[in-house]
């Protein structure tokens, strides 16, 4: 039996969690604000704290360091109904053990509670609090479980100097992750320098990275600092590092090992304290096996590995991505797109998006530029998307006014489930129903995921 402190201003949410935890044999204590929760914490010394982020008065994020100070050996799970990367990163930086969204998935909650209680008290170190950063936050959104893990990892490594290797297909947002790590960490005031290692031939890339002295090669009419010199005090992002030559790989290994490099034509090495973040869309382990990428460099780079899933594997994020991208597109091209039709969204759900988020942004940008009104319709989509057949059961041949209420409800529930990739917790949030009611609706209407979808 463990003692669990629940801190949430929502009385119904507290009662539901209390009944659930008691059914599993745990003792529960409740506080409806940060201050009340801290008083309960001092008296109860809980093994686990379930802390809501948004509350009247002090937020759970603001109170988190105080809970860590009050009960340093207690595990902490942050709970929120909002899906934003910055809150996730801040929660992990300030000492949270995990982060769960409302409506709460009971299976996810149970597994998280079991894992944290099994290790509660094992860590004695405090996580340094990081203040708010100036500037616009990176445009990363996602409520899928895999993206939540990415956000959590960003929060955990942002203040650490360790090298990070970001992997994932082209267009998944690897540079956005690198920028989020930089912006969220202690080096945020320093420069962020990005280098596309695949865009330059070997000799030019070497000069670009390490700089050169006057006369080092034909055309070198003056000395030029390299990117490692420019990134001092900040972060250097080496994109497509898997495309580098063996000679460049050897020089990068030296930088990682010795923190120094030698500009072309120079006689003395220079020091760099730049944090290194690298990315590749290649299977780097296969490149190591084939001998095209140094094994020692690979292990130096992937102290922490962050893998970004392709868009086809996180389609529950599509709606959030569309909303975020359209807001940016409206600003960039001075248009006023307010949304898209249900047919377009269903088409997006069926499409595999081989170009990932970059392709989605491209499709939205072109459609917005051609849109005469405020809503993106099917006729504005590229031919590859328009050719997609309508999924079975997604619509009726009869006009809407001839459908019964049951038919309309069944169609809408199926649309929401497909849009959420059959994530029932997210579907309940959109539909405004409980999980038991959603199960009854699925059984009553005999709803099933699209064949071959893997849901």
Image (cartoon, rainbow, N blue to C red):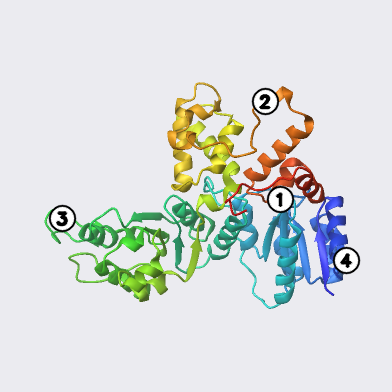
Q: Nearer the viewer, mark 1 or mark 2?
A: 2
Left or right: 126 in relation to 287: right
Q: State the SS at label 4.
A: helix
Q: Earlier in the sequence, mark 1 or mark 4?
A: 4
Q: Earlier in the sequence, mark 3 or mark 1?
A: 3
Q: Nearer the viewer, mark 2 or mark 3?
A: 2
Residue of label 3 = 220
Left or right: 144 in relation to 14: left
Judge the density around disc 2: few (<14), some (14-19), many (≥20) Cα neighbours within 10 Å. few
**Image quadrant occupied by the N terminus:** bottom right
Residue of label 2 = 398
Judge the density around disc 3: few (<14), some (14-19), many (≥20) Cα neighbours within 10 Å. few
Residue of label 4 = 22
Q: x, y (%) of residue 3? A: 84, 70
Residue of label 1 = 424
Q: CA distance from mark 1 to mark 4?
A: 24 Å
């Amino acid at each position: 039996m463990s003692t669990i402190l629940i801190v949430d201003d929502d009385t119904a949410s507290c009662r539901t969690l209390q009944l659930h935890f008691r059914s599993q044999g745990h003792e529960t204590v409740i506080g409806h604000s940060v201050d009340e929760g801290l008083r309960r914490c001092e008296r109860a010394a809980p093994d686990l704290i379930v802390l809501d982020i948004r509350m009247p008065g002090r937020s759970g994020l603001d109170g988190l360091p105080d809970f860590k100070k009050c009960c340093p050996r207690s595990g902490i799970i942050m709970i929120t109904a909002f899906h934003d990367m910055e809150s996730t990163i801040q929660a992990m930086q300030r000492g949270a053990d995990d982060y769960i969204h409302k409506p709460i998935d009971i299976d996810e909650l149970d597994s998280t509670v079991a894992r944290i209680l099994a290790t509660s008290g094992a860590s004695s170190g405090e996580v340094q609090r990081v203040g708010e950063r100036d500037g616009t936050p990176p445009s990363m959104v996602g409520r899928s479980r895999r993206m939540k893990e990415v956000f959590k990892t960003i929060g955990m490594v942002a203040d650490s100097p360790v090298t990070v290797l970001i992997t994932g297909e082209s267009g998944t947002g690897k540079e956005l992750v690198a920028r989020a790590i930089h912006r969220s960490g202690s080096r945020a005031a320093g420069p962020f320098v990005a280098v596309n290692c695949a865009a330059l031939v070997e000799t030019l890339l070497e000069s670009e990275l390490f700089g050169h002295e006057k006369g080092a090669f034909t055309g070198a009419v003056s000395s030029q600092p390299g990117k490692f010199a420019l990134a001092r005090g900040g972060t250097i992002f080496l994109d497509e590092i898997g495309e580098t030559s063996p000679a460049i790989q050897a020089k990068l290994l030296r930088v990682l090992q010795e923190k120094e490099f030698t500009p072309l034509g120079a006689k003395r090495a220079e020091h760099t304290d730049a944090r290194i973040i690298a990315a590749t869309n290649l299977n780097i382990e296969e490149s190591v096996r084939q001998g095209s990428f140094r094994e020692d460099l690979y292990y130096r780079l992937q102290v922490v590995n962050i893998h970004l899933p392709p868009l086809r594997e996180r389609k529950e994020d599509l709606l959030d991505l569309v909303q975020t991208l359209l807001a940016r597109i409206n600003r960039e091209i001075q248009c006023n797109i307010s949304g898209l039709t249900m047919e377009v969204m269903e088409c997006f759900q069926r499409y595999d998006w081989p170009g990932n988020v970059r392709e989605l942004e491209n499709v939205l940008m072109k459609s917005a530029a051609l849109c005469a009104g405020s809503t993106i319709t099917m006729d504005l989509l590229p031919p590859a998307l328009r050719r997609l057949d309508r999924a079975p059961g997604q619509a009726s041949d009869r006009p809407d006014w001839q459908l019964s209420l049951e038919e309309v409800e069944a169609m809408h529930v199926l649309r929401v489930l497909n849009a959420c990739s059959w994530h029932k917790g997210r579907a309940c949030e959109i539909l405004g129903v409980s999980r038991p009611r959603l199960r009854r609706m699925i059984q009553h209407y005999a709803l099933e995921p699209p064949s071959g979808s893997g849901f």
